[in-house]
Image (cartoon, helix red, strand yellow):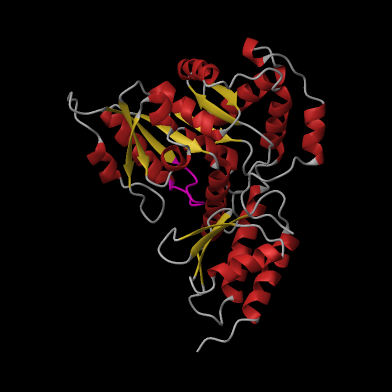
Amino acid sequence: MPDFRSDTVTRPTPAMREAIAQAEVGDDVFGDDPSINRLESHAAELLGFEAAVFAASGTQTNLMGLLAHCERGEEAIVGQQWHTYRWEAGGMAVLGSIQPQPIDNAPDGSIPLEAIEAAIKPDDPHFARTRLICMENTTGGKVLPMDYLRAVRALAQRRGLATHLDGARLWNAAVEVARRRSQNEREGDEAGSGGADPRAVARDICAQFDSVSMCLSKGLGAPVGSLLLGSRALIQRARRWRKMLGGGMRQGGLLAAAGQHALESHIDRLALDHARARRLALGLQAASRQHPDSLQVDTPQTNICFVKVSESIAPAFAAHLADHGIRVTGRSGAYGSGMVQRWVTHLDIDDQDVEDALTVVQAFFDRLPASG
């Protein structure tokens, strides 16, 4: 049965396995692995940066970026719910002596511009010096608006700060923005103009940042790896940090070839994951319609669907899914009482998997006593 825990659980496709098998390799610490060099060059050109560096994980590329931007005792502004602050083991503070300045996220996932402005410290010995503003896109599956990103960039430039993007799901954001632009074109012009290319959208997103961490092993379906992109000088500093963090790889071209295949073949298909997440959300809502408030389903913007399960049914519902092989993540008491589940669609989830999961969910609600 399908595994909805995360888009990190995908297996390499046959074509990706073939790319891995055919990969040319060298020693990347010496800089002579041709597959890694090709991936880094291709990604930098694709996204409008001077250089890139390949590493094992998004946690590592985020940390390398933060360390390359900030010295000990400097500060990075982050969102309370963003990975750089909450979900990456406190690496910026523990390993970099960088002070995080967290700001509460707004309902749309952003952190308010006025809150960012207020958090920037004056140049005073009493304070850590604010050096960096971090963003995350997508954030909880939500897409940060382009106008907002441009406003953050303008604020940072005005205050002399650098910007970093945790773009673990950058391509999900780009595909969704491209879809919206295409829809607007269709509604405004019957002839249409072909819509927006997600690659151009991703480049536009990246233009708002001095550095971007971009994951290859989430939506794109590679088995391992992320890239940090930025200026040549920043990437040179990041390579030193990668070595210090134990991240230097030898014949890593086997992994880079998988990432290269993902960038060439798996971007446009993300629209399928988004459509399946929307179908999943609609099906979950429909299955629980006769039991008001049992499930509160957020409408997904990309491939992540959050579902709040009422306290009265949460243990039984989780057990029912597990008994039928449906794997999701869930945290009790995450947002008040009950359980919040996260359902994620990805490369290894097809239309039938979604329908099979909804059949299992419907069976659970069919056996519940009718409300009222």
Q: Residue at coordinates 43% horizontally, 66% vertically from top-left?
A: 337
In the depicted structure, whether residue 160 falls above or below residue 83? above
- The foreground one among 257 and 210 is 257
Quadrant of res 259: top right
In the depicted structure, whether residue 310 falls above or below residue 264? below
- The foreground one among 152 and 68 is 68
Q: How many numbered marks are there?
A: 0
Queried whether the magenta region covers residue 351, the answer comes back as no
- Considering every residue shown, the one lying at the far bottom of the view is 372
Queried whether the magenta region covers residue 140, the answer comes back as yes
Q: How would you classify the magenta stretch by its main secondary structure?
A: loop
Quadrant (top left, top right, bottom left, bottom right) of the N terminus: bottom right
Q: Residue at coordinates 43% horizontally, 48% vertically from top-left?
A: 145
In the depicted structure, whether residue 367 falls above or below residue 54? below
Q: Residue at coordinates 56% horizontally, 72% vertically from top-left?
A: 285
Please provide percent x and percent y for residue 286: 59, 75
In the picture, measured across the screen, residue 320 lies left or right of residue 138, that is right
Please provide percent x and percent y for residue 169: 55, 43
- Considering every residue shown, the one lying at the far top of the view is 30
Quadrant of res 38: top right
Q: Which residues are magenta?
A: 136-145
In the picture, measured across the screen, residue 13 lies left or right of residue 204, that is right
Please provide percent x and percent y for residue 366: 65, 81
Please provide percent x and percent y for residue 210: 43, 27
Quadrant of res 221: top right
